[in-house]
Amino acid sequence: MNQPDRDALAAPGPLLLQPDAVLLPEGPADGWAVVIGDGRFESVGPAHELERAHPLLRPVRLPGHLLMPGFVDAHHHLTQSFGAALAFGEPSEIFRRVWVPLEGALDEESAYTAAKLAALEALRGGFTTVADAGTRAGVDVDVVASAARDAGIRCVLGLVCNDADSGDEASHPAVLENAEKHLARYAGDPLVHASLAVSIPEAATEGTLRATARLAAEAGAVVQIHVNEHLAGVERSLVRHGVRPLEHLHRIGALGPQLLAAHATLLTPRELTLLADTGTAVSYNPVASAWKGNAVAPATAMAERGIRFGLGTDGTRGDGFRLAEAAEFAQRLAYGLGTGDSSCGAGWTWLEHAHSGGADAVGLGARTGTIAQGMAADFLLVDVDTPELALSWDLPWELVRRGNRDQITAVYVAGRLRLWKGLPTDWDGPALVRRAAELARAAVGRADVTRVHPTSTVARALHRSGERSTQQ
């Protein structure tokens, strides 16, 4: 196995990196190289051309490695990391029983630590960007921004703008004033990009839904809303508004390129047309569908219709390769088996939506997600000289089906080496994990969390004692 020179990779730029191949939008390019400086790709092209054009730069050779875009997590909840395992075996809409009480039990230190822990897991899984859909913790959202910056990950940071349950008409202008301040607060920040968020459509008044859409569109930002995720949510909208959640947003003028619709698992043919016609983006969250959903989003149909979408973890597990695999696997099980579609979009579809498609969905398509001149140098160095990938016939497919985070040698964000072989380069990752374990026990103990399903050990004991149920 070839080992790159860490010191050379961590040196201040500009750097001329020469891997075996660079993953471009059209596929892997053998013998290509990149020059990174000032946080961006200054040049991308054949290695011999870049060496000739930059004679003063000493090439850093990376045999056995692929340089590829970092993954983009299009849907995350960074301050929920303390309770990630509480979702196992639980039915849908656990936000009411688990996430709301858990985040409500976080103080400033625990919210920061939870967010930084989630960011570390994301970096370890090859994510260079995460979209946080807004925290319910009673802390300044800048706590989450600080955690992302300190971890070294790019973050699209949502501010929750719910106001439907306030019961106070005077709160509506305050919500919008805070939204405007939030959008301005991170202007020019190299890693944090402001976003607005509404938990679910019924959590905000129609006026606020329209206004946040307008504010985000004017700022070039996105509004993140959980839409058509669960049957209960669809039914509530039908009872309250006479239309489904996505149709409700369309009727009040909140659909459009500024909207990032989280999940969108329960879609009618008409709703697919609405997404395509309005340019609305979707975060397709296949692992969340498997763990706690009612359905799998028709992502293959979305790709065919030109609907913009990225892949999201929903905080389930921070592994970009496994997420891409789950994206293809879920389509195969939910749609491909019944139609005889053995490809379900092929490897390139899911790989592309895991980086460039995700960057577009979260509003950063002009900044990151692609290895190209002028784009942010957010990328991975992946060891392809492994039993899983060395005998390559179709590298994009193999990355989807056989790639894993253990093959990630290095993670760069904004041109800086942030992670080396699973560990942060400029802060103490293991110390953070130890502190998180302490704080998590205390936070979960304070929170009024209600779980339907027992732990696996309790369920096993009940099973062996004959007290069986469908929930075990």
Image (spheres, rainbow, N blue to C red):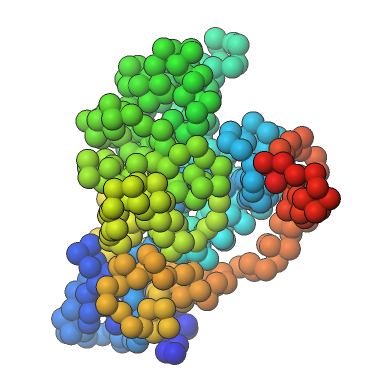
Instruction: Please say whether residue 406 is visible from this viewpoint.
Output: yes
Residue 173 coordinates in the image, percent (x, y) = 49, 16
From what the image shows, is residue 299 above or below residue 456? Answer: above
Q: Residue at x 44, y 90 (%)?
A: 1
Instruction: Please say whether residue 417 is visible from this viewpoint.
Output: no
From what the image shows, is residue 198 above or below residue 153? Answer: above
For the residue pair 399 and 175, the one nearer the viewer reads as: 399
Asked where in the image residue 77 lies, by quadrant, the reply is top right
Asked where in the image residue 15 lies, by quadrant, the reply is bottom left
Residue positioned most to the bottom: 1
Residue 202 coordinates in the image, percent (x, y) = 50, 20
From what the image shows, is residue 239 above or below residue 224? Answer: above
Q: Residue at x 42, y 89 (%)?
A: 2
Asked where in the image residue 398 lies, by quadrant, the reply is bottom left
Residue 94 coordinates in the image, percent (x, y) = 62, 36
Residue 71 shown left or right of residue 405 in the figure: left
Q: Residue at x 28, y 53 (%)?
A: 340
